[in-house]
Image (cartoon, grey):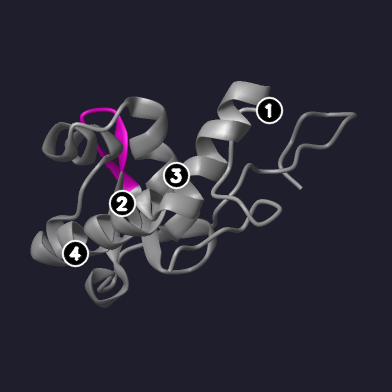
Amino acid sequence: MPELPYEQTSGHSGTDTSKARAIEADQSGKTAKRQAQAIDLLNENYGRGLTWKEFSSITGLHHGTASGVLSVLHKTGRIARLKESRNGCKVYVGLSWIENRVVEKQGRNKCCPHCGGNL
């Protein structure tokens, strides 16, 4: 920890301020602490898992930060995102709690530029 899959950062929106905030969090240990907290909370919630909204509510993290923590952990294979959703949000679970449920790959689906269908 921490997982830093985006050019050795935990990710940012592309603005200078967002990048500086990400680098500061990554170097200060905030990113590692948030990621460890997410894994701990997911394991404490067993198979129920958490949505980004639930994670944000528990931790007090802003939407972008909460969602980003879960996305990075999903991207790096530390947690899974289920196909199912709760209250309009995807559910994340610890790897031990996938059971027989369908999981989603991380990232956006690539679309055919001609027909718009998934590739």
Amino acid under label 3?
Ala
Q: Do the residues labelled 1 and 3 touch (CB within 8 Å)?
A: no
- Name the N-terminal-most of marks 2 and 4: 2
Name above or below for residue 40 compared with residue 6: below
Q: Is mark 2 on a helix, strand or loop?
A: helix
Label 3 crowding class (10 Å Cα cut-off): few <14, some 14-19, many 20+?
some
> Can residue 116 be seen?
yes
Whichever of labels 4 and 1 marks the residue nearer the N terminus, that label is: 1
Residue, disc 1: 14
- For marks 2 and 1, the one nearer the N-term is 1
Q: Residue at label 3?
A: 25
* Residue 89 on the magenta span: yes
**In this view, which residue lies farthest toward the right?**
114
Give the residues drawn in magenta, as a range: 84-90
Give 44 or 49, whichever is nearer the viewer.
Answer: 44
- The percent coordinates of residue 1 (x first, y second) are 43, 69
Q: Where in the figure is residue 48, as x and y percent of width and height?
A: 13, 56
* Residue in the foreground of this view, choosing between 35 and 20: 20
